[in-house]
Image (cartoon, rainbow, N blue to C red):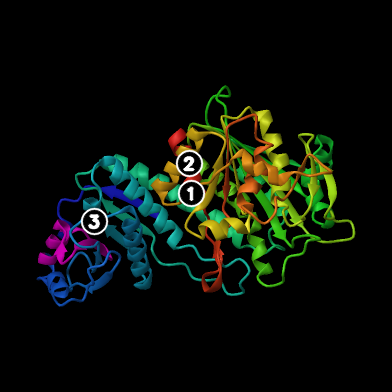
Amino acid sequence: MEFFAKKINDPATQATACAIVTVSGKQLSKNGQTLDRATGGMLAAAIKRGDLKPDAGSTLLVQTPAGTPAQRVLLVGVGKNRKVSQHEIRKILNASLRALTAANTRDAIFYLSELAEGSEAARALYQRLATTAVTSVYRYSETLSTKVARPALKKVTVDVGASTTATGARKALSQGKAIGNGTNEARELGNLPGNYCTPNDLAKRARAMARASDKLSCKILDEKQMKALGMGSLLSVTAGTVEPAKLIVMEYAGAAKSKRPVVLVGKGITFDSGGISLKPGGKMDEMKFDMCGAASVFGTMSALLDMDLGINVVGIVAAAENMPAGNATKPGDVVTSMSGQTIEVLNTDAEGRLVLCDALTYAERYQPKAVIDIATLTGACVVALGKPAAALYANNDKLATQLIEAGEKTLDRAWRMPLWDEYQAQLKSNFADIANIGGPEAGSVTAACFLSRFARKYHWAHLDIAGAAWMGGAAKGATGRPVGLLSQYLLDQA
C-alpha cells in the first residue's frame, strides 16, 4: 500500500475513486461543502434526509454524477459539535476503511485535517490512519487451499490542510505504515498453527530478517549452548517435546556502539499443552497463540527496520514447546535457573515465566538501558483487565510512564498493576528459592513478582498480554498487539 500527503486547495478538482469527508451532526466539513457543490447538493440532501446517522463512525457512500473527479464520496459521522476523542477517531478510521473495503475501492483521498488541532495531533492522526489502513487489508491464507483475496485498496492520500506540513505528514504516514506492517507480521506468526510455527521455524525467520538488513544481526542458541549457560529453567519446559528449544537473539544497530540498547524479550511457547499439568481440551487449539509475545518482538523488530530508527535494540525470543511425556518436568521438580536461583515447579502450565527468567538473565550481558518482556502469561490478567488493556508491571516509574504514554498514543493500551513486596511471600517454597506459582490469588501479580527476581540489575517492565494478544470466537485470530505500543516507545526513545 502506498501513502501520499499533499495540501489540496480544491477537493472538487482531485480525481479519486473515493473522497472521505466528515460530518459533524448534520454539518459537512469545509472540504465536504466544496464537494457538495460539485455534486449539485447531493451530499447535503442525503444528510438532510437522515441517510447518515450523526454518531461517530457512521458512514454513507454516495455515488457522484458522471464526470465528477471524485467518483464517490464517503460521508463519515464524527459526532455532534464537540471535540472528537481519540477513541472516536479510531472508530472513524476503522469505519471508513471497512466502507472502502466493502466498496472494493483501490484508491482514496482522506480529508480529515479538521479532526486534529495542531501539528503534533495531525501527525498522530496520519500515523494512525496508515497503521489502520495497512492492518485493515491483512487476511490469513497460509494454510488455506484457496487463498483469501485481499482488499483492493492500494493507494491512500491525505490532505494535510493547515495543521502540519506535507513533509511531516509523509513521515508520520511512513512510520504508521511500518507499524502496520509489523503488526501484520505479528498477527501472521500468531495465527500460524503449531506445526507450521515451531522454535526452529522462528529461528529461520530471524535469520532471514538478518540477511535482508545490514543493521540486523542474529544468533541462535541451541539446547547444548543453553545447557552450558546454565539455563535449567528454560530447558525444563522443553524436556517433554521432540522440538528443540531455541534462544533467538536479534541485534539492531541503529546508533553508536556506546549507546546502551533497549532489550525486548518475548515468550515464544509455540504450543502450550500445559505439560504434565495438562490443560482442559476445550480451546486448547488457541494455545498456538502462546507465542504472541515472541510474535510481537518479531513485529516490532520489523517495524524498527522499516523506520530505520537511530537506536540500538536487542530482541530476545525464548522459543519452546510445552508438551507432556515420560521425560517431561513433573510438578514438584526443582530446577536451577541461569541466575543460580532454584525454582520449585509446582505447576508445569506456568511455563512462560520459566523460559522468560533465563532470557531475562541473559539480557544482563547487554548492560541495557531498559528491558521489556512481553508474554501471554496468565489467565488472571484476562480476568482483571479483559481485552482492552495489557497488564504492565515495572520496577522503574519512568519506564512505566513512557510505556503507558506510548500505549495511549497508539490506543494499544496498558494499565499499570502493583508489584509490591507483600505479594512476594506467595512464592515461598520449602524446597527451593522460589516456587513458580503463588496460589489462586492475584495470579498475574505473582507471575510478575516471580519475573522481577530475575530483573534486579536493570530497569525492567513486564507486559502480560494474555487478554490483548488474540481474539476468540468468530473473530478468532491474533491481534498483533502490543507492536503498536512497543514501536511507539522506540520512536519516542529515538
Q: Which residue is mark 3?
A: 111
Residue 57's spot in the image, x, y percent? Answer: 30, 65
Residue 138 vs residue 147, the one in the foreground: 138
Query: Spatial distance from mark 1 to mark 2, Cα to Cα?
Result: 8 Å
Circle count: 3
Q: Mark 1 and 2 residues: CB-CB less than 8 Å, in contact?
A: yes
Q: Is residue 284 left or right of residue 482?
A: right
Does the magenta-highlighted stretch encompass residue 121? no
User: Which mark lies nearer to you, 1 or 3?
Assistant: 1
Say which label, 2 or 3, has the lower sequence index. Answer: 3
Residue 467 visible (yes or no): no
At a point 51% along the width and 41% down the height, the residue shown is 304
Q: Quadrant of residue 56?
A: bottom left
Q: Secondary structure at mark 3?
A: loop
Query: Are there few (<14), some (14-19), or many (20+) residues within 10 Å of tag 3?
Result: many
Say which label, 1 or 2, has the lower sequence index. Answer: 2
Give the numbered dot on residue 403: 2
Residue 126 visible (yes or no): yes
65 above or below 121? below
Does the magenta-highlighted stretch encompass residue 31? yes
Looking at the image, the residue that sits furthest to the top is: 258
Residue 91's spot in the image, x, y percent? Answer: 34, 61
At a point 46% along the width and 48% down the height, the residue shown is 178
